[in-house]
Amino acid sequence: MSLALTLERSNRIITVALEKAAELGLKPLTVAVLDAGGHLKALARQDGTSTLRPEMAQGKARGAIHLGIGSRAIFERAEKQPFFVQSVNALAGGSLVPVPGGVLITTSDGEIIGAVGITGDTSDNDETCAVAGIEAAGFVARIY
């Protein structure tokens, strides 16, 4: 039996991600947790973040859900095939943010059950916090 992405586990992801950010001394973050259908499950925006951060966090996670790969992989693909990623983003209504910080949430058997998108610091730091939150909630984080 696989774990479900409940509101409680979604909030745990957010809490641990923000704790990791505090530990690393990062800038204020926005964390979005989406379910497997790309729907918002939970979101937290720390004080001091800019106004577009909720959309950016969801865009990182949404890209991961829609393409079935982490946003780091999407970023790398955009460097090699910019027209492909641009076309996919157009199909998605411009809602994808193809930079690291969008991490798939999977079960131990590889089933994609959601994604986390984080924005606010460097993309690498955003991704580090997402992985920490996902793993603390008992899931497997997939960045590729």
Image (spheres, helix red, strand yellow):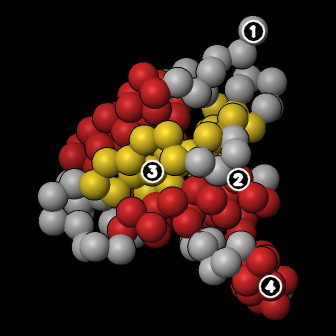
**Residue 47, image quadrant:** bottom left
Q: Residue furthest top?
A: 1
Using the image, determine if residue 107 lies above or below residue 100: above
Residue placed under numbered mark 1 in the picture: 1
Residue that appears at 81% across and 90% down: 83
Measure the C-alpha gap from mark 3 to mark 4. 24 Å
Q: Earlier in the sequence, mark 1 or mark 2?
A: 1
| Circle 2 Cα neighbour tier, 10 Å, few/some/many (<14 / 14–19 / ≥20) | many
Q: Residue furthest left?
A: 47
Residue that appears at 42% across and 22% down: 8
Q: Earlier in the sequence, mark 3 or mark 2?
A: 3
Question: Where residue 21 appears, x then y in whole percent?
Answer: 29, 49
Q: Earlier in the sequence, mark 3 or mark 4?
A: 3
Residue placed under numbered mark 3 in the picture: 32
Residue type of the residue flagged with mark 3? Ala
Q: Judging from the image, what secondary structure is the residue with disc 1 in? A: loop
Residue type of the residue flagged with mark 1? Met
Q: Judging from the image, what secondary structure is the residue with disc 2 in? A: helix
Viewer-closest of 61 and 121: 61
Are circles 3 and 2 on residues that touch, CB within 8 Å?
A: no
Residue placed under numbered mark 2 in the picture: 65
Residue that appears at 58% across and 27% down: 5
Q: Which dot marks residue 87?
A: 4
